[in-house]
Image (spheres, rainbow, N blue to C red):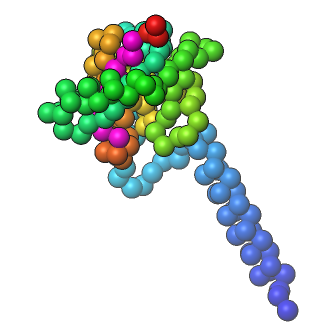
Amino acid sequence: MISSAHARTVANLAAASCLALLLGACGGGMSLPSFSSSSPPPEAEPGTGPEMPATIRADEIVGRWGLASFQNPADRARTEAAARSQCKNPYVITAGSSGGVIMHLADQATPQELRLKGSPSGKNYIGPAGPTPGDQDREIVSFDGRVLITRFIDKDAATRYGNMVYVRCAPRA
């Protein structure tokens, strides 16, 4: 049989443990002094701030595109020609309902509305709402109105997909 003094000690320890867990889960309502040497909190990653408008408008990339990709920059011209030949089965970018464009994210079968986002460095990105550049974003490497080249920010997706080359298909006759 457990004595009442022992039971009271166990109950007090359990209550203190629960209180510590609850306070820890609050995530910063009250700051207690630390007896260990701690470093200051990490700074925000550069370039991740509020969304800036892109210098490329969504309506500029809406249309029918031939699509191909390359890893080696020396293959760019050949890849543009390969993308142009894909216009018989084009990748279609449509306008989204809230000002974005409908495109696929890496490894997603269903297209969704993505935003064109700018950055303080002057780079443009295509991706879901959120910090720029986000893991699911793709950087617009170059765009001249006829050829759009993008690269995924995520290292794994960038390795698998390479530099995506979109060549605008001629309008249907």
Q: Which of these two is toward me, 14 or 72?
A: 72
Q: For residue 4, which quarter of the picture?
A: bottom right
Q: Is residue 91 above or below residue 100?
A: below
Residue 151 visible in rendering:
no
> Quick check: 13 left or right of 80?
right
> Quick check: 100 left or right of 19?
left
Q: Residue at x 45, y 35 (%)?
A: 136
Q: Does the magenta run of residues contain 129?
A: no
Q: Residue at x 21, y 30 (%)?
A: 78
Q: Is residue 125 above or below residue 136?
A: above
Q: Which of these two is toward me, 42 or 103?
A: 103
Q: Which of these two is toward me, 28 or 70?
A: 70
* Quarter occupied by the N terminus: bottom right
Q: Residue at x 50, y 22 (%)?
A: 92
Q: Position of residue 28 (x, y in %)?
A: 57, 41
Magenta part, dominant SS: strand
Q: Is residue 76 above or below residue 24?
A: above
Return the residue found at the far left: 74
Q: Position of residue 26 (x, y in %)?
A: 64, 45
Q: Residue at x 74, y 75 (%)?
A: 9
Q: Position of residue 145 (x, y in %)?
A: 33, 10
Q: Position of residue 126 (x, y in %)?
A: 43, 24
Q: For residue 149, which quarter of the picture?
A: top left
Q: Which residues are magenta?
A: 161-170
Q: For residue 116, which quarter of the picture?
A: top left
> Quick check: 14 left or right of 42?
right
